[in-house]
Image (spheres, helix red, strand yellow):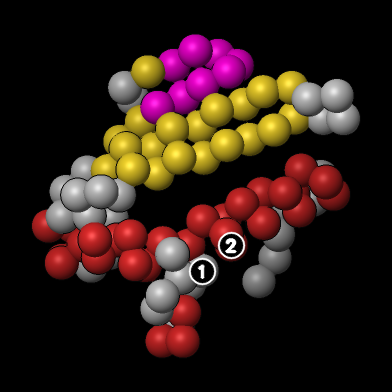
Amino acid sequence: MIEADPPRKLVQTWRMLMDPQLQAEGFTRLTYEIEPTGTGTKLTVIHDLEQAPGLAALVAGEHEAGGAGGGWAWVLSDLKSVLETGAPLTG
């Protein structure tokens, strides 16, 4: 962890270990910013991928056709579903 300001901000390092080429790109920086709004809560995720072009392509969903997942769009969509329903995702 690099920085924590509960409940507003969390900054951490992250590293892809599933692929040797992406692992070699090293650590990236993830920032979560949480702020209340008039109707709920706003979550902003900033993933600094400037020094990790391979991971940037993966996270952007450029490899979905090959079965490589949908990056942050999938993760955040699933998180939203869990928060709205209170139930864990299956499958």
Question: For the magenta stretch, what is the residue range?
Answer: 4-11
Side of 84 relative to 82 (left or right):
right
Give the x, y percent position of residue 19: 23, 67
Give the x, y percent position of residue 3: 37, 18
Q: Few, some or many C-alpha atoms within 10 Å of disc 1 (few <14, some 14-19, many ≥20)? A: some
Label for residue 7? none
24 shown above or below 8: below
Instruction: Name the residue rendered at 40%, 44% in the picture.
Output: 47
Q: Mark 2: which amino acid?
A: Trp
Q: Quadrant of residue 75?
A: bottom right
Asked if one can make out residue 68 in the rendered structure from this viewpoint, the answer is: no
Give the x, y percent position of residue 2: 31, 22
Label for residue 74? 2
Are the residues flagged by discs 1 and 2 in contact, CB closer than 8 Å? yes
54 shown above or below 80: below
Q: Mark 1: which amino acid?
A: Gly
Query: Which one is in front, 21 or 52?
Result: 52
The residue at which mark 1 appears reads as: 70
